[in-house]
Amino acid sequence: MIVLFTGPSLPPSEVPALPNLRVLPPAAQGDVYRAARERPWGIGIVDGFFEHVPAVWHKEILWAMSEGVRVFGASSMGALRAAELADFGMVGVGWIFEQFRAGALTADDEVALAHLPAEHGYRRVSEALVDLRATLAAAIEEGTCEPALAERLLALAQGQFYPERTWPSVLAAARAAHEDPRALDALERWLPGGRVDQKRRDALALIEAMRAARIEHPEPLQVQFAFQYTNMWDQALHRMREERPCVDADPDASALLDELRLLGDEQLYLLAVQGALLRGLAEETAERHGLKVSPELVQRTALEFRRTHGLYTGSVTTAWLADQGLDPESFFQMMTREARLRWTEAVSEPEIRRHLADQLRAMSCHGRLSAHARAKQAALEREALCAAELAGSSASDDAALWQWYFHERLGKPVPEDLAAYAERFGFGDPGALLRAVRIERWYATAAEPAPARAIRHR
């Protein structure tokens, strides 16, 4: 996926079609961070807010790049940030970027302009200095304007407040300054067909550059710097998550929630909502620890995921992806998030154990599980047996043991892939599951006072 932040420089309705392109309004502080959390291939910044809300923060762009997201900038706010962060790997595109990068332009108001809201298509109501410069350069080249007059017109434009900077206002100021009226009239007649929209040109060049770069470099970005996690960054994360609507939210999430609620399955609803919450917390934990997910780890996670879900063949996997609304690229991104979730689960095991009892009580199954565990331990102590010793004893027929556990105890067939089954339930490997089942069978057949019955939660 490519995310593009644009507005008055290139209205969304005029953005060329590009596969998997998501167009968002001009970026403010936190928007690039939120977009990068979805791990798109790249982010393009054309326009950004700067006056009434905090502007895009350099550090959120650095964080995005450190997470493997390629970030491009052009035309307006994107050109400014690209000129400032080019040494760190942000890619600048276009004449405006080149002018800032070379130091020929230095003032932020070179790209500033006033515009109408999104519902009016971000229509401009003022002129950016960079467009005035490009237009006057074209007028000089065509012989419509003398270089000296162009310099004086630019000086007049620079003296105006950016929302009031328009061609009519600049020409009016020039007439008030007693510039040659014939030269001004000639320029005014030439403007409708000769005006240069450099910001638009550069925005279009950025889209083309991202399209080409995605073909040439489909892999995640590898940066040459180490992102520094600081207290200020942690504090900024809370602001960036709360101050503006999340740009990375699934647009279908509200409809999906309604469908989930209408099923009337309370357990399924709670499982989905709490699971989504845990995924969000896992992402936050992985970010705070600076976890880097390599392509190799993503591939291993994908193989484990496919095995766990019975996706053993290409055709079955393709059908599953289509049913889940995924393509290979979005599945790769999902597996990147899955890898973070599994890493967080592994490092958070002490916390899981600490909160497990409360969770089981909330599920109304703590009592019978706790009673069963205590009774089993008491039986082992009565027989002077050690769980480790019993688990390590040999079984005459492991196949029969599996038949007992799955058929008699759980009332289900023996899984074809015991490794995947063990993994789904948090056992390190089938051997760990086998040891637990041996102890359970011993207790059920040799020590349990009442007939064995499955412990199930519905």
Image (spheres, rainbow, N blue to C red):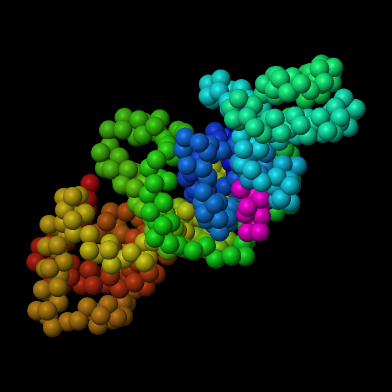
Which one is in front, 312 or 216?
Answer: 216
Left/right placement of residue 399 relative to residue 63 reads left
**Res. 6 in view:** yes
Q: Is residue 440 above or below residue 44?
A: below
Residue drawn 34% across and 48% down?
277
Residue 89 x %, y %: 65, 57
Which one is in front, 139 or 445?
Answer: 139
In magenta stretch: residue 227: no
Highlighted magenta segment, given as a residue range:
81-92
Left/right placement of residue 400 relative to residue 143 reads left
Residue 346 x %, y %: 37, 65
Residue drawn 58% across and 61% down?
295
The image quarter containing residue 408 is bottom left
Predominant secondary structure in magenta? helix
Residue drawn 13% across and 83% down?
384
Residue 25 x %, y %: 54, 33
Quadrant location, the N terminus: top right
